[in-house]
Structures are given as structure tokens and as C-alpha cells.
Image (tube, helix red, strand yellow):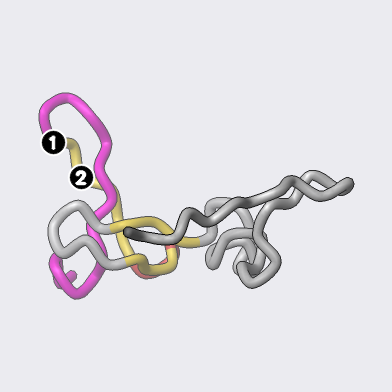
């Protein structure tokens, strides 16, 4: 029989003590990096361009679309 883990919400609203809060992309600023629709990697917006695909503007990094 497996052991049931019980978690409690602390007074400050956090449940997990071992996990760090926040996003890994928060340090670089809001909108500073985007995911390339072709390779899926996050790259700075300055190192890419937008391409119109299926009537939407999609970000493409410079590695996938050389100038």
C-alpha cells in the first residue's frame, strides 16, 4: 500500500517548500524572448523575425531563417 502524502497550505499561500516560485523567463523581462514556431527553442526577439503563417504572425529565429 502506498503512503498518502498530505500537503498543507501555509499562511502565506504556498504549499511546496522545496520548489522555487516564479518563471525561468521572468529574469529576462516580459516579452524579451519568444519560442520559434519551427524549432521550438526560446530565442531573444531581437535575433529573429515574424512570418505570416495561416493568417497569424509567427516568430521565427535567425537560425531557422537565415537573412
Residue position for label 1: 53
- Looking at the image, is 9 positioned above or below residue 42? above
Q: Is residue 18 magenta?
A: no
Q: Residue furthest right?
A: 11
Q: Residues within 10 Å of mark 2 (few under 14, many from 20)?
A: some
Q: Residues within 10 Å of mark 1 (few under 14, many from 20)?
A: few
Left or right, 30 with respect to 12, comes to left
Residue position for label 2: 51
Residue plotted at (20% across, 52% down): 37
Whether label 2 touches label 1, CB < 8 Å: yes
Left or right, 24 with respect to 46, comes to right
Residue plotted at (65% across, 60% down): 16
In magenta, the rendered stretch is: 53-67
Q: Is residue 64 magenta?
A: yes
Q: Residue furthest front?
A: 1
Q: Where is residue 39? Give x, y as percent.
A: 15, 64
Number of the label disc, if any, that sits on residue 31:
none
**Residues at marks 2 and 1, CA–CA distance in whole angstroms:** 6 Å
Q: Residue furthest top?
A: 55
Front residue of this view, candidates 3 and 51: 3
Q: Secondary structure at mark 2?
A: strand
Q: Quadrant of the C terminus?
A: bottom left
Amino acid at each position: 500500500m502506498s503512503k498518502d502524502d498530505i500537503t498543507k497550505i501555509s499562511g502565506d499561500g504556498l504549499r511546496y517548500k522545496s520548489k522555487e516560485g516564479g518563471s525561468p523567463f521572468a529574469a529576462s523581462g516580459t516579452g524579451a524572448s519568444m519560442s520559434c514556431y519551427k524549432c521550438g527553442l526560446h530565442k531573444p526577439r531581437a535575433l529573429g523575425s515574424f512570418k505570416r503563417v495561416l493568417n497569424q504572425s509567427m516568430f521565427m529565429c535567425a537560425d531557422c531563417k537565415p537573412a
